[in-house]
Structure formats: C-alpha cells, structure tokens
Image: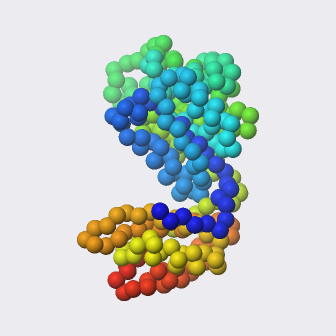
C-alpha cells in the first residue's frame, strides 16, 4: 500500500469509541464506526483513532481515559444509552469524569415527546415513564441532551476540559440521525483549514509502477496521496488512489487541473484505464 505526503495532516481531530459485546463477538458489524468516519471525512475532518470495547465499565473507562489523554478535540462514543441494565455508557462516563448523575429535565421532555409521538402514530397504545425509561434521562451533570428524531434515547454532549465528548445510541439509524442533525452543526462552523479528497480508480497498473510516477509528481504539489490495492481480476490490477489536499491552499479548479496532469502522467500505456 503506497502512502506519500508532503504535508502534515494537522487539523481538528476526532476519536471514536464503539461499545458493545456484540461488536467483539462478531455477531454485529461495526457499521457505526464506518458511518461516523464517512460523515466526518466528507466535511474535511480527520479521525485519528478508534476503540472497540465491551459493555463493561472498566473497559469503557479505560478507552475514555485513553482518548482524553490524546490530542483529539472531539470524542464520539457509540452505544449503551438505552433503558436496559447493560446500557452503562453514561454512568461509566460520569464516574470516569468524576461527575454526578442527575435527572435532566430537557432530556426527560424529549423522551416524553417521543413516546407521545409513538402513541399518536398508533405504534404503541399508551405509555408511562417507568424507571427504565427515566434512566435514559439521567445524564452526567451539566450535559447537553441531543434530540433523537428516530428513537427514544437522546444523545449527550459533555464539555470536559478542552474536550467535547458526544455519546450516541448504538442503533445505527438513531446514531446517524443525531450525528447529522445535532452533532455536525456543533462542529461545522470551525474555520480552520480542512482536508478535501478526490478519488481515482485505476485499472491496469501495479503499485510498483505507480510509485515512481507519484513520487515525481508530488515534488510539485502540496498533496497527500494514498493508494489502496483492490486486487486482481481477469489479469488486471485494480487500485483506488485517494488524493487529499488542504482546502485553503488548493481551490476546486486547481485540484481539477492537477488531476488532469496526474491522469496524463499515470497513463503510461494505452491499456491503463482511470475514472473518478
């Protein structure tokens, strides 16, 4: 796998903690990690690290301490916000950060409104706020609940020292809804330089042939280029080439011009095919 760069990717960084026994047993694919990374990369942010831990307070606390000790400004936690006994993310987070747990009235109102909506849609006949449902509104002190338009458990934002800790439900559709509609508006106003990317799909050339072409090409531009081999089929090599660049240094028109030159440089034979 070919990876070359002429600049350091020093931007707002994110770390992700995925929680759930089902993720480590192999019963469930960790699609939430993929979704969060995709969402962040599309708007120019970098995910530095990820952790996957089981539903165990010691493990959750370890991962959270690791993330806090690092240089990432945002820590996104997925899983363990529901009403059952093994949904322990918020209680473990509170104990790790030495914060008291308290009933958050805003979160409770969100939960009540959600159940009222389910009744109105004839999905359930009626509801009452049981201890299990109230549990989803018991948050670390000074937390900010994040509205869940798909499920019942609100997301949670915790400001801790210089970190922003976001706790999201593990149900994929709920996680994605809160991530897009609640979390992105909180982080999207940052004006610092971001990373944009273009992808070329190349057939008919090997990485060893591609490497000297890219090396020579990079000497003229401030880019980061990483190749991902996609295997061989019908005797043809397939490569995905990701070209990343700083948004404040390279405009859309300039990157398109650079890509045209790059494509011309790679087409050393007539049988090489490139698309993007």
Q: Please state the horizontal and vertical placement of residue 152, each as a whole percent of the image.
A: 46, 28
Q: Quadrant of residue 251?
A: bottom right
Query: Residue placed at 33% from the left, 27% from the top?
Result: 122
Count of marks overlaid on the render = 0
- Nearer to the camera, 166 or 19: 19
Residue at horizontal 54 percent and vertical 64 percent from the top = 3
Can residue 149 be seen here? The reply is no
Measured from the top left, where is residue 12 in percent x and y?
66, 51
Residue plotted at (67% across, 41% down):
70
Q: Quadrant of the C terminus?
A: bottom left
| Above/below status of 169 relative to 226 | above
**With respect to residue 165, does 93 lie above or below?**
above
For residue 56, say whether it is visible: yes
Question: Position of 190 compared to 84: left or right?
Answer: right
Q: Position of residue 244 (x, y in %)?
A: 57, 65
- 180 left or right, relative to 74: left
């Amino acid at each position: 796998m070919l990876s070359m760069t002429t600049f350091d990717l020093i931007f707002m960084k994110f770390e992700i903690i995925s929680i759930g026994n089902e993720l480590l047993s192999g019963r469930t694919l960790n699609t939430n990690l993929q979704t969060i990374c995709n969402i962040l990369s599309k708007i120019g942010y970098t995910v530095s690290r990820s952790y996957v831990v089981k539903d165990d307070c010691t493990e959750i606390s370890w991962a959270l301490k690791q993330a806090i000790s690092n240089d990432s400004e945002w820590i996104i936690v997925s899983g363990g916000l529901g009403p059952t006994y093994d949904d322990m993310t918020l209680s473990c987070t509170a104990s790790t950060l030495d914060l008291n747990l308290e009933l958050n009235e805003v979160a409770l109102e969100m939960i009540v409104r959600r159940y009222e909506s389910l009744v109105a849609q004839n999905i359930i006949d009626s509801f009452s706020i049981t201890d299990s449902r109230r549990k989803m509104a018991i948050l670390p002190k000074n937390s900010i609940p994040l509205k869940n338009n798909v499920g019942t458990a609100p997301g949670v934002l915790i400001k801790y020292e210089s970190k922003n800790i976001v706790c999201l439900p593990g149900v994929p559709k709920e996680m994605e809804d809160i991530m897009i509609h609640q979390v992105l508006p909180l982080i999207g106003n940052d004006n610092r330089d971001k990373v944009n990317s273009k992808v070329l799909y190349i057939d008919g050339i090997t990485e060893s042939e591609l490497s000297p072409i890219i090396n020579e090409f990079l000497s003229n531009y401030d880019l980061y280029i990483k190749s991902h081999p996609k295997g061989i089929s019908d005797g043809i090599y397939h490569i995905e080439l990701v070209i990343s660049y700083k948004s404040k240094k390279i405009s859309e028109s300039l990157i398109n011009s650079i890509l045209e030159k790059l494509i011309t440089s790679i087409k050393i034979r007539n049988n090489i095919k490139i698309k993007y």
